[in-house]
Amino acid sequence: MTADDLLIRRAEKADADEVFALAREFGLTFRPEREAFDAALPALLANDDALLLAAVVNGRVRGYLLGFVHLTLFANGPVAWVEEAMVQSGSRRQGVGRSLLEEFERWARSREAGYVAMATRRAPEFYHALGYEASATFFRKVLR
């Protein structure tokens, strides 16, 4: 794959099947269910504070990133949060994840976000190479 083969764009409703397949690969704690996915996708696509990106290679979605910008009190304005970032296992280490994150960062800057953050234990060397640093411990309590 060359850089010319990769297109990063906003996801569309027509991408649903491929994004759902990737979400199922992403999910470790939760198993994505199609009915819930189909209910969430249009709302996310219409949400001005959300960005769902698709990484398309040769007409196929090989990765996606879902992130949000929201206001804070402590950071003197908005911050950006990557909720999900997934690249198909056969398409990793080819610049797909980097391109998704760079496009999200551009969008976050355009929304005047003070920083971009995410919670992950996967691929720390990837995030360090892009200038991210470990910042906090992540706590979670499952409610359902």
Image (spheres, rainbow, N blue to C red):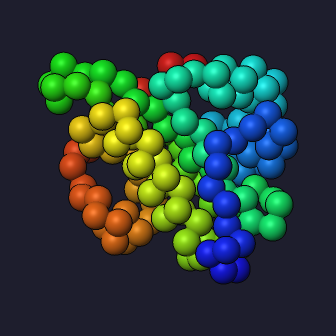
- Image vertical order of residue 136 relative to residue 131, above or below: above
Q: Nearer the viewer, residue 23 or 68?
A: 68
Hey, which quadrant is residue 136 in on the image? top left
Q: Nearer the viewer, residue 88 or 12?
A: 12
Q: Nearer the viewer, residue 123 or 78?
A: 78
- Image vertical order of residue 24 relative to residue 56, above or below: above
Residue shown at 24%/55% (left/top)?
134
For the C terminus, the quadrant is top right
For the N terminus, the quadrant is bottom right
Number of marks drawn: 0
Residue shown at 46%/32% (left/top)?
68
- Image vertical order of residue 86 relative to residue 3, above or below: above
Task: Please give left or right for residue 129 compared with residue 11 in the image.
Answer: left
The percent position of residue 80, horizontal first and vertical second, equals: 36, 37
Hey, which quadrant is residue 51 in on the image? top right
Residue 39 can be seen, yes or no: yes
Task: Please give left or right for residue 95 compared with residue 45 in the image.
Answer: left
- Image vertical order of residue 74 relative to residue 64, above or below: above
Residue shown at 71%/72% (left/top)?
5
The percent position of residue 113, horizontal first and vertical second, equals: 30, 36
The percent position of residue 96, horizontal first and vertical second, equals: 59, 66
Residue shown at 66%/28% (left/top)?
45
Q: Nearer the viewer, residue 139 or 87?
A: 87
The percent position of residue 94, horizontal first and vertical second, equals: 59, 76
Residue 36 can be seen, yes or no: no
